[in-house]
Image (cartoon, rainbow, N blue to C red):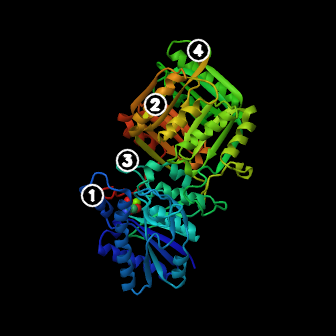
Amino acid sequence: MALVVQKYGGTSVGSTERIRTVAQRVAKTAAEGNQVVVVVSAMGKSTDTLVGLAADITDNPNQREMDMLLSTGEQVSISLLTMALQALGQPARSMTGAQVGIVTEAHHTRARILSIKPDRLRKALDQGEVVVVAGFQGMSTPAPGNDDFEITTLGRGGSDTSAVALAAALGADHCEICTDVPGILTTDPRLVPEASQMEEVTCDEMLELASLGASVLHPRAVEIARNYGIPVVVRSSWTDQPGTWVRSRPAGPRSLEGMEIARPVDGVELDLNQAKVSLLQVPDRPGVAATLFGAIAQKQLPVDLIIQSIYEGNSNDIAFTVKQADLDLAQSTAGEIYQSLCDAANSALPAEGIVTDGAIAKVSISGAGMIGRPGVAAQMFQSLSDAGVNIQMISTSEVKVSCLVDADQSDRAIAALCKTFEIHSSSLAPLKPAGSQTPPPVRGVALDREQAQLAIRHVPDRPGMAARIFTLLAEAQVSVDMIIQSQRCRRVNGIDTRDIAFTVARDDADRAQAALADIVEKMGCAALEINRTVTKVSVVGAGMVAASGVAARMFDALASAKINIQMIATSEIKISCLVDENLAIEALQAVHQAFALEGTEVVEVPKGA
Ligand code: ASP
Ligand code: MG
């Protein structure tokens, strides 16, 4: 007998008629011989309505009372759905978050789950009942010396989190997220009507595509699915279409205690087979990256990290890494391209135009818990700095931070990181992409709008600088996205310096600026520059590690659309380019088309989506 958790969103239980339809579907799943736990959201937009009622009373509602209020929405839908099931002759019982033992932090309106003790739920299942659980809510553990339990909510969209967390605690066979769309799409269909539905996607890919998938499946739910290895499927509430499977690699044993807060980092990886090629002062215009990586791809050279740092004057630095055995060929290919760019511009190749380093190592930390926790990257930089390791290049994505360091410092770097993040060497092996077949090089394309780019010029090139900068930002609760340290080294007052650029959500730009104002002066850096008109376009796919030419194809698509790339950052499964926000949609369309992701069917966009 399988145990299935089904979650129905607000639209799916938006009217009594829909609730009756959902009941039929649940009863059918039970009749097929499954034990079924159903998690539901509040009916339609009722959570919004409740928020509105509170706003009518006061501008500053008490957070405990907000939870008391908002948790009522889900209680309406669980009782009605249970009645509908009973009316069909299906034994069923509703339970609140507290009744199924969902214990959370005490942070009202945004509590994270600490543990689940589903004994009562399991008993009801064993008695042949369907259990209908209120999503989005839990109860907080009492503070020491005070045994008052409180109702908490998990933050907007939190029912997905409830469902996957229950699936993890119960050891369910899978979790179905039943919603008003047929699955997860390759890009935003409002911007690219040719978007098609993915058959499957890995949790890591899904997390990297957060801006694309978050409205369909909450990132916190993906994080739990990944950490506990729960298969999740996103599918329509109304059809038998298969939907999109969100897969994870089989998870190692992981305690249910501290479910959402323990171990933000669960892997430390070392790659000693890295060599770096840097092109300094290449012209800042469309097509340069495309030409360079097109030539590299033609030689079938797999490229790992690619970084283009913020422009200086009218030129950029582009650096990339390849396997050590490929260094000579990569260097000569890059040299030819650089020479031809200079010939075309009638200028001479700069003396220090191409720099290589054959003895570098990549150290990375990975883990789904870094999302929304700005302190994790800072902790990594601090740990490396304490170990006296200088960071040459940084590359970040949602679930991974990689740093290039000198090969002869890599042992020290790894030891420090394992200690800081309490990782035992058994988890050191590089993690293979999950999924049932070989994953495609590119699964989806996402746009992150409302980004701002900040750059600190002339940061002294010595250990500890990145740690200081990103610790300050973490303390100001600013989540940093792409972090890029330039290749170009500039001597200022006898000290070697580099520029560090990064992106943040546009709303956080002022806070980031305020947090850094002091240190920029104290560290003797030059200006802090802000550009508030950038957008990030990213391609994501677990299969890109095994394919060559993915980056070249993306850059080429942008170049053909005459779009200038302002910054490039990559991880194993993601390539992100920063472009001018006015060109964002054009960029998205061009890239989506370049990877032939369009479907044959027109995907219907639900109203109000
Ligand atoms: N009802 C809650 C909300 O609207 C939780 C959910 O639907 O996931 O945010
Ligand atoms: Mg939702």
User: Which one is earlier in the sequence, the residue at label 2 or at label 3?
Assistant: 3
Vertical side of 81 occupied by 42: above or below: above
Is label 3 within 8 A of ligand 2 (CB to nearest ligand atom)?
no
Amino acid under disc 1: Gly
Residue at screen point 58% across, 53% down: 439
In this picture, residue 234 sits left or right of residue 487 = left
Badge nearest the viewer, 4 or 2: 2
**Image quarter (top left, top right, bottom left or bottom right) of the C terminus:** bottom left
What secondary structure is marked by label 4?
loop
What secondary structure is marked by label 1?
helix
Where residue 561 appears, as percent x and y from the top left, is: 41, 33
- Mark 1–mark 4 distance (CA, rounded to whole Å): 62 Å
Quickly name the residue at label 3. 192
Where residue 432 appears, as percent x and y from the top left, is: 65, 52
Quickly name the residue at label 4. 350
What secondary structure is marked by label 2?
strand
- Mark 4–mark 2 distance (CA, rounded to whole Å): 27 Å
Quickly name the residue at label 1. 52
Amino acid under disc 4: Pro
Q: Residues within 10 Å of mark 2 (few under 14, many from 20)?
A: many
- Mark 1–mark 3 distance (CA, rounded to whole Å): 33 Å
User: Which one is earlier in the sequence, the residue at label 4 or at label 2?
Assistant: 4
Q: Residues within 10 Å of mark 4 (few under 14, many from 20)?
A: some
What secondary structure is marked by label 3?
loop
Where residue 29 appears, as percent x and y from the top left, is: 47, 78
User: Which one is earlier in the sequence, the residue at label 2 or at label 1?
Assistant: 1
Q: Quadrant of residue 88?
A: bottom left
- Mark 2–mark 1 distance (CA, rounded to whole Å): 36 Å
Quickly name the residue at label 2. 454
- Mark 3–mark 4 distance (CA, rounded to whole Å): 42 Å
Badge nearest the viewer, 2 or 1: 1
